[in-house]
Image (cartoon, rainbow, N blue to C red):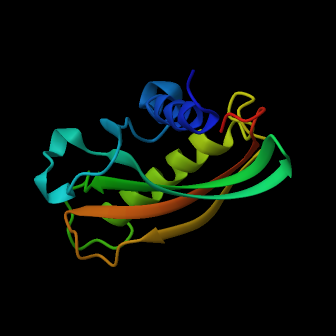
Amino acid sequence: MASKRETLLEYLKTLLATVTTGNGYHNTLNTVERGIRNVREMSDDQLPAVFITMTHEKRNRITANQFKSDLQVILVGYTKNSKGDLNGAGTGVELDLDRLVEDITKAVETDPLQGQRVYNTEITDIVTDDGDLTPTAGVVMSVVFAYASEGIAP
């Protein structure tokens, strides 16, 4: 049986894979994976991409057989410049990055209970690159999922 943590991370991957223009988002995510790849080694048709990378979990015991967890998940997203304008502030890759952040936020926060897997979801930090990845851009987002274990299984 999969742990609650594993189930949540796989659900997040499945959820992010639903980010398509056909589902009302700005982008269609062409790559959604656990782990991370170097954006410079990715082809244009693999972007935009979101990677479910590092996690940090804080646990507090509730009972002898149960704990509460705040699972911080780091998402790394990359997008390409859809306009081909390398110098147009707000019209090129910056706008594409803003829309990627909006899409990830919408996907994660549409169901704050994550299909009844958690009792709270919160995006706590968003950090974008400083522009040195042109013609691509990147973002790191921290998402915290709060859940309680069921019995002794994490």
Observer-nearest of 61 and 137:
61
User: Quick check: 117 above or below 128?
Assistant: above
Say which residue appears at 78% left-offset and 33% top-offset.
151
Q: Which of the 4 image quarters holds residue 2?
A: top right
Observer-nearest of 74 and 66:
66
User: Quick check: 94 above or below 2?
Assistant: below
Say which residue appears at 39% left-offset and 68% top-offset.
90
Say which residue appears at 68% left-offset and 38% top-offset.
110
From the image, which quarter does the C terminus lie in?
top right
Q: Position of residue 16 (x, y in %)?
A: 48, 36
Q: Position of residue 140 (x, y in %)?
A: 44, 63
From the image, which quarter does the N terminus lie in?
top right
Q: Which of the 4 image quarters holds residue 58?
A: bottom right
Q: Is residue 8 left or right of residue 145?
A: left
Q: Is residue 151 left or right of residue 29?
A: right
The answer to whether any part of residue 20 appears in the image is yes
Say which residue appears at 30% left-offset and 35% top-offset.
30
